[in-house]
Image: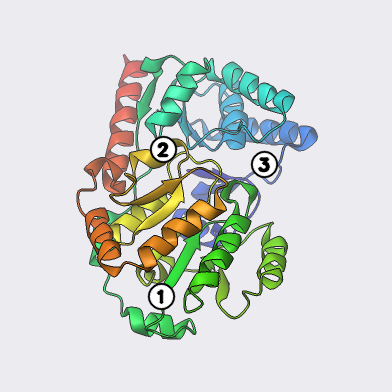
Amino acid sequence: MLVSGESGILDREAQGLLGEHFYRVPYLVREISPLKDLLATRDLARLLNRLKPLIVHTHSSKAGIIGRLAARLAGVPIVIHTIHGFGFTRYQQPLHRWMLVAAERLIGRITTRFFAVSEANRLEGVERGLFQSDRCAIIRSGVDLTTIRRMAIDTRAKKGELGFDPLRSLVGMIAPMKKQKAPLDFIRAAALVRATRPDVGFVFIGDGDLRPAVEAEVSRLGLNESLQLLGWRRDALEILRCLDVFVLTSLWEGLPRVYLEARASGIPVVGTRVDGAEEVIRDGEHGYLVEPGSVSGIADRVLRLLNNVNLRVAIGQRAATGIPVEFDIHHMVSQQEQEYERLLAGIAG
């Protein structure tokens, strides 16, 4: 069964796949809202009390806190939380950050088991006293490596479909337009690259609250003719295959799954050194990592790859090979099933 909060673009697909087993709790929203959070906890606890699951498995920080609390109120015997990065970051006010850490510590006491998508997240959780080391397993947030590798894409035709010269170099980013992903850094890096290489095109796949700010920055920097904002796309992996360089400007992450998708597609990555990034991308081998917020660093590495075809091809080939099986989505599902069975056997005993 899947329980979601406010409506989104995947609701129809979820409803089609799960039917009556897809539930929504409208008061469960992304932003902190004391009244809505209280109502969401109440409604979710009532739903779980009616459904009586043996396991509740939560994802993301906000839904993780409310979901785990509601599960305990409903008497659910096994409560699991997957850490995809933490809700507290160094970019927040100290008091706000302290309150979020305190909430995670408190809810951690009623959590049966933790999964972390990166070793960096697991270590931070232990260091901050959210859980003991033996209560957290590493289960990567995998991607479908086989399907990505088998995709046959006519990249020239796809570029033409997007309105780009098929022989033109293309740089892109895939992310929601929200503060965490720092989309304005991508736009500014694109401007720096274009100053040296006016022949290069840029695409941004994704949408979100920061779109008006992104559009304004594109206009301010004179990128309207060379940078396309494509919004949400069903063919994102096809477009990814058309890129010469993939960029991600995130300020924080758990483990960027799109790095894995880029690697499996044989596309060099230029991204930020956040949380689990170094567990996926080895600097200089699969691409380049720079510090979050380093727009000039992003632009410099992108130009390095664009200006050296042999280097770009070699890095792309290395990126596509040797991806550990732990990053495959089928392995991820198998690991989760094994953990479920082990925990269920414990309560059965």
| Amino acid type at image mark 1 | Ser
Residue shown at the point (39%, 16%) measured from the top left: 133
Mark 1 residue element: loop
Label 3 SS: loop
Q: Which badge, 3 or 1, is on the more N-terminal residue? A: 3
Q: What residue appears at the point 66 percent right and 75 percent down from the top-left corner?
A: 222
Residue topped by disc 1: 169
Q: Is residue 254 above or below residue 322?
A: above
Q: Secondary structure at mark 2?
A: helix
Tell me the amino acid under the disc marked 2: Gly
Number of labels in the image equals: 3
Q: Position of residue 345 (x, y in %)?
A: 30, 21
Q: Residues within 10 Å of mark 3 (few under 14, many from 20)?
A: many
Label annotation for residue 28: 3
Instruction: Judge whether residue 232 can be spotted in this image.
Output: no
Q: Amino acid at mark 3?
A: Leu
Which quadrant of the rendered structure holds the C terminus? top left
Q: Earlier in the sequence, mark 1 or mark 2?
A: 1
Graded by Cα atoms within 10 Å as few (under 14), some (14 to 19) or many (20 or more), the crowding at tag 2 reads: many
Dots 3, 1 in contact, CB < 8 A: no
Q: Can you tell which quarter of the image residue 219 is in? A: bottom right
Residue furthest to the left in view is 322
Determine the CA span between mark 1 and mark 2.
29 Å
Mark 2 vs mark 3: which is more N-terminal?
A: 3
User: Which residue in the protein does label 2 denote?
Assistant: 276
The residue lying toward the viewer, choosing from 80 and 321, is 321
Instruction: Decide if residue 217 is on the left or right side of residue 288.
Output: right
Residue shown at the point (56%, 58%) measured from the top left:
11
Image location of residue 41, percent across then percent down: 67, 31
